[in-house]
Structure formats: structure tokens, C-alpha cells
């Protein structure tokens, strides 16, 4: 035990209010529970309240996950004086009203991606965050991967030379079967399609690694324009969002790139991937092998595989041994750690609403380019 060790009971309390108990609600709950075990924090994390539209489910999950209170409506969670930080893990169209209410109450906000369902909403959220002066973060968890940190450092250090190419893809297959029913993800007013769902992660990662993108041209396609309203139902609902979107990218640093997002690509479960080429080498990554980076420098016989290990920042808090591998939920814990550090005034790691607005602006530019079938400069929006 270090001499400076302060028992967590002697620390100020940070009350967490979590909204949503689905896929991401559980991931956030795990991260908020694990972060104090992985890191010595400047605060005591208190799981103060959990809200879900389904009050019985909120009650059950609060018990199971260790939250002190359950709420059947989210506004009462935001009003709860014991909640200092509001985590939003609801369908995309609810991010705006929930984040705006939390900001108005002066609380820190941790919102899932995509930030909003329109650039107009994202702009208001960005302005409200600036005015509130509180910490905001958005759940682009993949960039908290220690091996992504290594890739970013190698690029920044010039190890690849001048960056000339980016090929990025985020494909999954979860909507690949046309009999997979409609969900809120298929509704423009609730979500925004494969571009919003998967593409937002890839755009955030491209910016994280290579910086600003100046211009895009794009094509968007809805392959399955009808889906059953529920599993096995013969009633069909028209789908108005993209199943797949492809784009060309021009980066401010001069590099050229490609982008694609699809939720129809059979065989892929979480294929967030990129190849970045420079004048002196190439890096390749695939989230399905999230502990590996492939590196090629001229003169090698092929790509060299680098395995994540405890020398990379963020790895050793989970495991002292190389090659034992981190997982998706560890990335979420690293994200929550960066968030808590920022809330406590220690560092400014992680994408905030300002950065998420940049990502939303890029997504809007891609939609406009696809709709008008032309190159769009980002500063048009
Ligand atoms: P989900 O459908 O599994 O869960 C949504 C939850 O929100 C449910 O518990 C639902 O009851 C609750 N909810 C709906 N309306 C509500 C309301 N009015 N008040 C309170 N709760 C309400 O969805 P999900 O897959 O968890 O996705 C949620 C968000 O997380 C989305 O924005 C999605 O894009 C994002 N997400 C991010 C990642 C990532 O890797 N960062 C992965 C999956 C989903």
C-alpha cells in the first residue's frame, strides 16, 4: 500500500446517476463498479440512482447492480441531489432532452454515442455544455484501448512518415437477415442507421488518430427497405435509414481515405478496423482482435504483430502480464476512469461534447454528400 493511500471512505463522494438498463446500461454499470477496483481515485464512487422507463426493471437492476435508488422517470434521477454525474444510455433520440436537462441542472454528463439525431440538436448540446461549464464525455470507448494509444503515439512521432492513406471500416452483421425486425435503430427520428450507429465510432476514431477531415463524398443505401414490426410478424414497416454507407475522405493533413459502415455484413461481429499508411510504413487494427496492432515497415518480410501488455498505459491496472488481453468492458472502465479524473480536475482525456459535435458535423456532411451526390466541404455545415 502506498504511503499516500487515502481510504475511499475518507474521500468526497461522486454520485452516479445512470439512465437506461439495456446493453449499454449494463456496460456502464460494470465500468462504474470496476473503476474503483482498478484505480485509486480522488473520489468515492457512489452508485446513487438508476432510471429506466420500465420502473420494475429499474428496481430489479438497481438491486442487482448495487444502485441505491431506482426511478421510473429520468427527470427525477436528474433532480436527485445525490446525483452529480448523469450517464445516458438510452436510444439516440433521448440523448438530447436528457443531456440538456442534466446540463441545466449543472451536472456532469456522460452520454452514449451518437451525441444526437441531428446536427441542430448536437449544436445546442455543445452550446449548453459550454454555458454550463461542466465536464461532458461521449462513449466512443474504442479510442480508450491502450493499443490505440500506441498507434496514435506512433503516428504522432512520425514512425510511419507522412500519413497518406486511411482505410476505415465498421461492419457488423446484426441486421443482415431481412427477417430481423424493426427496432428504434431503424427510425430516423430515433437513431439514424448504420452511419449513426457504427459510423460515428469510426469517424471519432479517424479524428482521434489523424485529426480534422476537410471534405467528403459519399453514397448511402438502404438494402432492406421493409422489416417485420416484431419477430415473426407478417406486418412490415418501411425503413428509412441507411443499412450501409461508403465515403471518401480528405484529411486536413493531406491524407486521403475511405470510410464504410454496414450492419449487414455477414461474418463480422465488431469489425471496427483501419489501415493507415504513411511514406515509411503501415499500421493495421481490427477491434475483433483488440489487443493486436499490425505494423509494417519497408524491408520487413511482412507485418509484425504487436500484442498489448503492461507497458502500455491502462493495461497493467487489469493484468500484469502481456498477451493476456483486455476486453470490451475494460475499455469502458478506462473511459469511465478518464471521465472521473476530468470531473475531479485531474486531466482532460476523452472526447467531450465539442469533439462529439465535430463527429456529428462529419456525419451530417456525409449524409448531405450522399443526398446530393457531390463532394461536401465540412465548413459548409
Ligand atoms: P437498448 O435498447 O438495449 O437499451 C435502451 C435502454 O433505454 C432500455 O433499458 C430502455 O428501457 C431505456 N429507455 C428507453 N426509453 C427510456 C426513457 N424514456 N427513460 C428511461 N429509460 C429509457 O439500447 P442500447 O444498445 O443499450 O443502446 C443505448 C445507447 O447506447 C444508444 O445510444 C446506442 O447507440 C449506444 N450504444 C453504444 C455502444 C458503444 O459501444 N459505445 C454500444 C451499444 C449501444
Image (cartoon, rainbow, N blue to C red):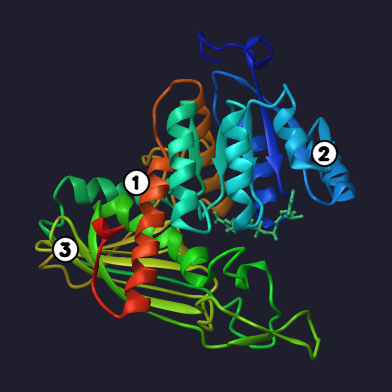
Tell me the element at label 2: strand
Residue 209, image x, y percentages: 29, 52
| Location of ligand 1 given as a quarter of the image | bottom right
Mark 2 beta carbon near ligand 1 (under 8 Å): no
**Would you say residue 8 is visible in this rendering?**
yes
Q: Position of residue 210 (x, y in %)?
A: 24, 54
Labels 2 and 1: the sequence-earlier one: 2
Question: The N terminus lies in which quarter of the figure?
Answer: top right
Q: Secondary structure at mark 1?
A: helix
x, y percentage for residue 120? 45, 53
Question: Mark 2 or mark 3, which is nearer the start of the sequence?
Answer: 2
| C-beta proximity under 8 Å, tags 2 and 1 | no
Q: Quadrant of the C terminus?
A: bottom left
Residue hosting label 2 = 71
Quadrant housing residue 162: bottom left
Q: CA distance from mark 3 to mark 2?
A: 49 Å
Read off the residue under disc 1: 149
C-alpha distance separating marks 3 and 1: 20 Å
State the residue at coordinates (87%, 45%).
60
Q: Check the image and report above or below for 107 versus 189.
A: above
Task: Identify the residue position indicated by label 3 in the image.
Answer: 255
Amino acid at each position: 500500500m502506498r504511503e499516500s493511500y487515502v481510504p475511499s471512505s475518507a474521500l468526497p463522494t461522486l454520485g452516479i446517476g445512470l439512465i437506461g438498463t439495456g446493453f449499454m446500461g449494463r456496460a456502464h454499470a460494470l465500468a462504474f463498479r470496476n473503476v474503483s477496483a482498478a484505480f485509486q481515485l480522488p473520489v468515492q464512487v457512489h452508485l446513487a440512482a438508476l432510471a429506466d422507463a420500465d420502473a420494475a426493471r429499474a428496481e430489479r437492476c438497481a438491486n442487482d447492480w448495487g444502485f441505491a435508488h431506482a426511478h421510473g422517470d429520468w427527470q427525477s434521477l436528474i433532480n436527485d441531489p445525490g446525483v452529480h454525474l448523469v450517464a445516458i444510455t438510452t436510444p439516440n433520440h433521448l440523448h438530447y432532452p436528457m443531456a440538456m436537462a442534466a446540463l441545466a441542472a449543472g451536472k456532469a454528463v456522460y452520454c452514449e454515442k451518437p451525441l444526437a439525431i441531428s446536427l441542430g440538436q448536437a449544436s445546442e448540446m455543445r452550446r449548453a455544455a459550454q454555458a454550463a461549464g461542466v465536464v461532458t464525455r461521449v462513449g466512443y470507448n474504442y479510442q480508450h484501448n491502450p493499443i490505440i494509444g500506441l498507434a496514435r503515439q506512433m503516428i504522432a512521432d512520425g514512425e510511419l512518415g507522412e500519413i497518406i492513406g486511411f482505410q476505415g471500416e465498421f461492419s457488423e452483421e446484426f441486421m443482415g437477415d431481412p427477417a430481423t425486425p424493426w427496432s428504434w435503430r431503424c427510425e430516423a427520428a430515433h437513431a439514424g442507421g448504420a452511419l449513426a450507429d457504427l459510423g460515428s465510432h469510426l469517424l471519432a476514431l479517424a479524428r482521434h488518430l489523424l485529426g480534422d477531415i476537410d471534405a467528403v463524398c459519399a453514397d448511402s443505401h438502404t438494402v432492406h427497405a421493409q422489416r417485420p414490426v416484431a419477430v415473426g410478424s407478417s406486418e412490415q414497416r418501411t425503413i428509412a435509414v441507411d443499412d450501409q454507407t461508403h465515403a471518401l475522405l480528405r484529411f486536413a493533413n493531406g491524407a486521403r481515405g475511405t470510410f464504410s459502415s454496414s450492419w449487414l455484413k455477414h461474418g463480422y461481429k465488431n469489425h471496427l478496423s483501419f489501415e493507415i499508411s504513411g511514406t515509411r510504413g503501415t499500421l493495421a487494427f481490427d477491434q475483433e482482435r483488440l489487443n493486436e496492432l499490425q505494423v509494417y515497415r519497408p524491408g520487413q518480410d511482412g507485418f509484425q504483430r504487436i500484442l498489448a501488455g503492461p507497458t502500455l498505459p491502462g493495461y497493467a491496472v487489469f493484468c500484469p502480464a502481456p498477451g493476456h488481453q483486455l476486453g470490451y468492458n475494460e475499455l469502458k472502465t478506462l473511459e469511465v476512469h478518464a471521465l472521473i479524473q476530468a470531473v475531479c480536475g485531474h486531466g482532460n482525456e476523452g472526447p467531450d461534447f465539442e469533439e462529439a459535435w465535430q463527429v456529428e458535423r462529419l456525419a451530417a456532411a456525409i449524409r448531405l454528400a450522399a443526398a446530393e451526390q457531390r463532394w461536401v466541404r465540412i465548413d459548409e455545415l
